[in-house]
Amino acid sequence: MGFFDFFRKSDINQAVKDFQNTDGAVLLDVRTTEEYSKGHIPESKNIPLHIISTVEFEVENKDTPLFLYCRSGGRSGQAASQLKGMGYTNVKNIGGIMSYSGEVER
């Protein structure tokens, strides 16, 4: 990894493909329920940041690959930190849906 790779943002479009190709992975949308209902990435589950601790009811295995997104990447970054603090070992902040060019569900 070069010095400038550190500053490069995650490509959400490639990350969604990575999610789809990862057995047992879970795609989490950490935006509000209202934001989620206006459009979300197919196959994603909505667990808003303010109740991220409830993920344990949805994902019991702490080694499950988790791919997180929000609107721009900020909240998913916060959620990733919290999940790691809860013992989840395979957490990836993939950024914001604003940069997503695929289909969305409503």
Image: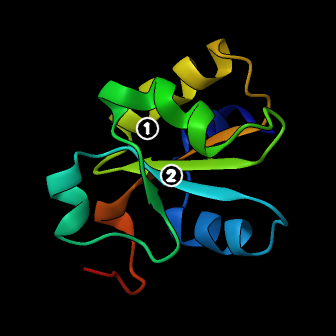
Task: Provide the secondary structure element on which disc 1 rests.
Answer: helix
Image side of residue 41 versus residue 37, left or right: right
Q: Nearer the viewer, mark 1 or mark 2?
A: 2
Q: Between 13 and 53, which is closer to the camera in this rendering?
A: 53
Image side of residue 91 versus residue 38, left or right: right
Establish if 93 lies above or below 99: above
Q: Between 78 and 37, which is closer to the camera in this rendering?
A: 37
What is the CA distance from the residue labelled 1 to the residue labelled 2?
Answer: 9 Å
Query: Residue furthest toward the top?
Result: 85
Q: Residue at x 32, y 82 (%)?
A: 105
* Residue 102, percent from left and from top: 42, 84
Q: Residue at x 38, y 87 (%)?
A: 103
Instruction: Work out whether mark 1 precedes mark 2 in sequence or the reverse, and give the earlier one.
Output: 2
Establish if 68 lies above or below 26: above
Q: Residue at x 14, y 55 (%)?
A: 34
Q: Are marks 1 and 2 in contact (CB under 8 Å)?
A: yes
User: Label 1 neighbourhood size at 10 Å, few (<14), some (14-19), many (20+)?
Assistant: many
Disc 2: which residue: 28
Query: If the image is split into quadrants, where does the C terminus sit?
Result: bottom left
**Residue type (three-letter) at the residue carrying disc 2:** Leu
Please, which colouring scheme is shown? rainbow
Q: Quadrant of residue 63?
A: top right
Disc 1: which residue: 76
